[in-house]
Amino acid sequence: MKDLPAEQRPREKLLARGAAALADTELLALLLRTGYRGHGVFALADDVLRHCGGFAGLLQAAPTTLAAIKGLGPAKRAELLAVMEMARRALAQPLRAAPVFDAPERVKQFLGLQLGNRTQEIFAVLFLDGQHRLLQLEEMFHGTLTQTSVYPREVVKRALALNAGAVVLAHNHPSGVAEPSRADEFLTQTLKSALQLVDVRVLDHVIVGQGQVVSMAERGLV
């Protein structure tokens, strides 16, 4: 990177023209700082983006995925994982301060970042307070690539323990297709009935695919 003219170096370019002026590879290279012998930092940044499928995939990449990329040692992996966690917390922060339906797209982005690109099916619940602000996100059940077992009693127990007033249900489809199935509709109604007994509303059931997030409430299915 030092061999480049000053105006072409990512750091100088960012400071002079803003972060939006940097290409994806330049932006990641600025974070990685160095490559490895015979493979410069820009080549390494390109490897990472191709391996993960761009920044969207990188933000959802598992530690094992990063460990499989040559040139990403423990320090670089730790920095990337820290950036991912900062992105998640940045999306969660406004959900804790205002009702989730003040920003439905942000809820989708938050859940997409949490559950997208996971190879195992995960059922998660956003527990909300009486004003529909985020209390906690919990990954409650983990299944196989094709199915998961969800126990309504456990969801009810956690809602009571957190003094939740409402919930948003969420799960991922590792196949990549985010369309709700008949089983998803049945599960939503089962949980809705169970939670109604303790005065907890089900506001939505969000399904996360690869690059797509679907709200069942928007489809009139909740």
Image: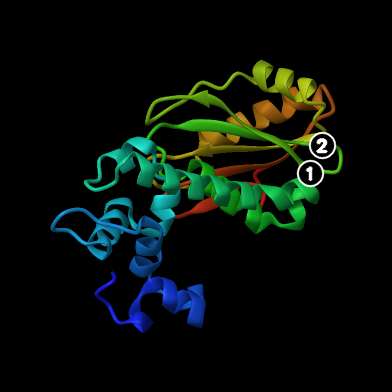
Q: Quadrant of the N terminus?
A: bottom left
> Image point 86% across, 43% down: which residue?
131
Q: Residue at x 27, y 77 (%)?
A: 4
User: How far from the left and from the top, in percent, is residue 152?
Assistant: 65, 20
- The quarter of the displayed image where residue 48 is located: bottom left
Side (left or right) of 182 relative to 117: right
| Of 60 and 109, the residue lying toward us | 60
Decide: is 152 above or below 37: above
Which numbered dot is residue 133?
1
Q: Residue at x 28, y 71 (%)?
A: 2
Instruction: State whether residue 11 is above or below residue 218.
Output: below
- Image x and y of residue 112, in percent: 52, 48
Asked whether 183 or 95 is in front, the reply is 95
Q: Which residue in the structure is indicated by mark 2?
A: 129
Left or right of residue 174: residue 158: right
Secondary structure type for disc 2: loop
Q: Are marks 2 and 1 in contact (CB under 8 Å)?
A: yes
Q: Amino acid at mark 2?
A: Asp
| Mark 2 surroundings within 10 Å by alpha-carbon count, few (fewer than 14), some (14 through 19), many (20 or more) | some
Q: Tell me, yes or no, if residue 2 can be seen here.
A: yes
Instruction: Work out which quarter of the rendered image holds the C terminus and state it.
Output: top right
* Residue 179 visible to the viewer: no
